[in-house]
């Protein structure tokens, strides 16, 4: 029996208020078409909207409200444009990620049949550790993990732990069992022997519990060339934070556009749908932003909810969204970044029609 769900909506900045409502409409249409439960949406302030009302980009009231939800959609934020001192603090997505301990960042990259892209046939997933590694803001209880002892010297530190490496590796191998049973570990253990060496070794240890999954590993610099040359050969790629960020952006472009690159941030009991791309303030308000990444992120959230609650109907709604996106693009409807002429809102309308026709 399907559940009803209480989901948060954080529109974000720039193109956020354009692409997030399209994803909301897609979820509602797919839930109804799949015979799933109802969604109660709760819109919460974040970014410039919150700064104007509360003087901070991520108010505690928003975090408290999210604690009462089953998951949420987060639009992109334009934190580089925030006034100081907010610009120099942990950004909204980082604040939420740290508050809820969202250690897994799952970033698929899949090309659409018939679409012009660098590497047709790409269908891989970057599984990125999301709470430690070589992004300084992930490594401290308080502060950003960066320091500047003198005007001419800046220092950052990176942390990799056995437990952090183990749990992200488990996520990667579990996902690979549901896909093509191949995991690639990415590291830089020839230079960063103790840190990324630990990450690699722990991932190899986890691999022993998944004997049906093929395992290989590459240094980060070699991995970038392998992706450019033969992205379709890869299935699940697991790596630390910064490497995962770089590889997922590269993979998204190889598959067609960052505008189609979805993402899910999760822990054992929380999940946040967030597109991999930024807020694109240069095209905000023009109704030309590509909503596919945000829509795909929402579909990932539905499948996560289906797995967590043993709810096949809501998982089916997530699958239905993905099928409808592919059918919409294949039919010739896409935004300018993909060579099409559709508006953002127009793509959303076509998608809802496709969801109905697939059922």
Image: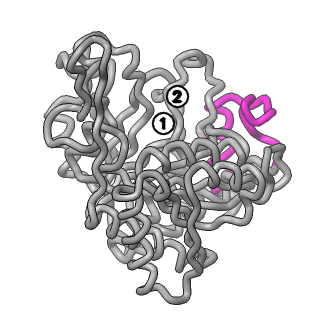
Tag 1 secondary structure: helix
Residue 226: quadrant of the picture: bottom right
Q: Does the magenta stretch include residue 348?
A: yes
Residue in front for this viewpoint, 341 or 268:
268
Check disc 2: other Cα within 10 Å, few if <14, some if 14-19, many if 20+: many
Task: Judge whether residue 174 is colored magenta.
Answer: no
Instruction: Please tell me whether residue 146 is drawn above or below residue 178 in the rendered image.
Output: above
- What residue would you read off at disc 1? 21
Q: In the picture provided, is 148 more to the left or to the right than 36?
A: left
**Which residue is depicted at the point 50% across and 30% down?**
278
Visible residue check, residue 141:
yes
Magenta-highlighted stretch: main secondary structure?
helix
Q: What residue would you read off at disc 2?
A: 18
Which span of residues is magenta-colored? 331-355
Q: Residue drawn 22% across and 50% down?
A: 100
> Horizontally, is 128 left or right of 222 in the view?
left
Local SS, label 2: helix
Q: Residue at x 28, y 20 (%)?
A: 88
The reply to whether callout 2 and callout 1 are in contact (CB within 8 Å) is yes
């Amino acid at each position: 029996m399907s559940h009803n769900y209480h989901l948060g909506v954080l529109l974000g900045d720039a193109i956020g208020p354009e692409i997030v409502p399209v994803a909301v409409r897609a979820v509602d249409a797919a839930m109804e078409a799949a015979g799933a439960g109802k969604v109660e949406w709760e819109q919460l302030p974040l970014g410039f909207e919150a700064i104007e009302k509360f003087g901070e980009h991520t108010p505690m009231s928003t975090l408290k409200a999210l604690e009462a939800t089953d998951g949420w959609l987060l639009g992109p934020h334009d934190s580089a444009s925030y006034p100081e001192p907010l610009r120099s603090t942990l950004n909204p997505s980082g604040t939420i990620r740290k508050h809820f301990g969202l250690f897994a960042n799952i970033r698929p990259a899949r090309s659409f049949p018939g679409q012009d892209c660098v590497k047709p046939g790409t269908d891989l997933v970057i599984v990125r550790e999301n709470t430690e590694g070589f992004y300084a803001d992930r490594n401290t209880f308080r502060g950003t993990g960066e320091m500047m002892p003198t005007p001419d010297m800046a220092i950052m530190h990176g942390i990799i732990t056995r437990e952090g490496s183990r749990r992200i590796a488990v996520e990667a191998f579990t996902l690979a069992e549901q896909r093509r049973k191949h995991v690639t570990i990415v590291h830089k253990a020839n230079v960063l022997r103790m840190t990324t060496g630990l990450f690699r070794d722990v991932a190899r240890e986890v691999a022993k519990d998944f004997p049906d999954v093929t395992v290989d590993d590459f240094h980060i610099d070699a991995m970038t060339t392998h992706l450019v040359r033969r992205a379709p050969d890869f299935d699940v790629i697991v790596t630390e934070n910064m490497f995962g960020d770089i590889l997922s952006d590269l993979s998204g472009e190889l598959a067609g556009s960052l505008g189609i690159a979805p993402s899910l941030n999760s822990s054992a009991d929380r999940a946040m749908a967030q597109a991999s791309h930024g807020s694109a303030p240069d095209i905000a308000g023009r109704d030309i932003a590509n909503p596919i990444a945000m829509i795909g992120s929402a579909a990932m959230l539905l499948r996560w909810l289906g797995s967590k609650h043993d709810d096949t109907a809501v998982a089916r709604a997530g699958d239905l969204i993905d099928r409808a996106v592919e059918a919409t693009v294949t039919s010739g409807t896409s935004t300018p970044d993909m060579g099409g002429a559709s508006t953002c809102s127009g793509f959303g309308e076509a998608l809802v029609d496709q969801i109905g026709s697939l059922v």
